[in-house]
Amino acid sequence: DRERGVASSISPRPWQTDTCIGVWHYHKKLYDEDGYTTPKFVVDMLVDIVSCNGNLMLNIPLPNDGMPDDKEMKVIDGITRWMAVNSEGIYGTRPYRIPGDGPVAPPPAAGVKFNESARKDLTAQHVRYTTKGETLYAFVMGWPEQGEKKQAVIPALATGDGPDPGRVQNVELLGYGGKLNWKQEAKGLSIELPDEKPSEHAVTFKIAGAKTA
């Protein structure tokens, strides 16, 4: 019932799904009307799926010359730029104890199992998780808008009641070389953000010391 339109919990077995940036064959009308899926949509969907133990295949419909058109290349470029910074939290990872935190949407209509068209862009209030060995990756799915306090909160690492999250030892922001100020407290792991985001769409925190198993 999360705002994911794909899955709402971690599957005990790996699974795979697919999506397309347009329709499943090349359609000139989509090009003319700027109808392709955005890189943000694909990144949100990818992180959602990986956090639930899944894999995503992405289809790029090709015109008759066999090469993506210029607008498709912009979508591919946006995804590629994001992956260049954040792929460490995607490739070779496993699920955390929960897929994520954040506002939830109303349950889907009866009988709806795959509702990609109903997805809404995820925001800075949404967090998704993956792990690799003893490292936890927390994807904050947006950047605080102008006027908001430039702080990310990772609720799963809250101290106090609930599962023991472990004691955080270090926090890095993928794509950012500076040192971060952070505090693990009752509301979660609070992290002060730098002035500029290291990538568009989601940003990824690499966290040492949290319990990953």
Image (cartoon, grey):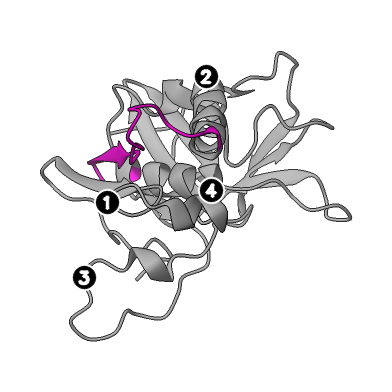
Q: Is mark 2 on a helix, strand or loop?
A: helix
- In terms of sequence position, does the residue under pointer 3 or pointer 4 come before the other? 4
In the picture, which quadrant includes the C terminus?
A: top left
Q: In this view, does 107 lie above or below 130?
A: below
Residue at horizontal 76 percent and vertical 35 percent from the top: 193
Counting other residues with Cα less than 10 Å from the Cα at mark 1, is it few (<14), some (14-19), or many (20 or more)? Answer: few
Could you tell me the amino acid type at mark 1? Trp
In this rendering, would 99 be left or right of 172? left
| Res. 208 in view | no
Could you tell me the amino acid type at mark 4? Thr
Which numbered mark, 4 or 2, is in the foreground of this view?
4
Per the model, the C-alpha gap separating discs 1 and 2 is 27 Å
Where does the magenta region start and end? 51-70
- In terms of sequence position, does the residue under pointer 3 or pointer 2 come before the other? 2
In the picture, which quadrant includes the N terminus?
A: bottom left
| Res. 12 in view | yes
Task: From the image, tell me which residue sits under label 2.
Answer: 84
Per the model, the C-alpha gap separating discs 3 and 4 is 23 Å
Counting other residues with Cα less than 10 Å from the Cα at mark 2, is it few (<14), some (14-19), or many (20 or more)? Answer: few
Task: From the image, tell me which residue sits under label 4.
Answer: 38
x and y, in percent, of residue 101 in the image: 47, 56
Residue at horizontal 23 percent and vertical 42 percent from the top: 54
- In terms of sequence position, does the residue under pointer 4 or pointer 2 come before the other? 4
Which numbered mark, 1 or 4, is in the foreground of this view?
1
Task: From the image, tell me which residue sits under label 3.
Answer: 113
Q: Is mark 4 on a helix, strand or loop?
A: loop
Q: Is residue 2 above or below residue 211?
A: below
x and y, in percent, of residue 18 in the image: 25, 46
Could you tell me the amino acid type at mark 3? Lys
Task: From the image, tell me which residue sits under label 1.
Answer: 24
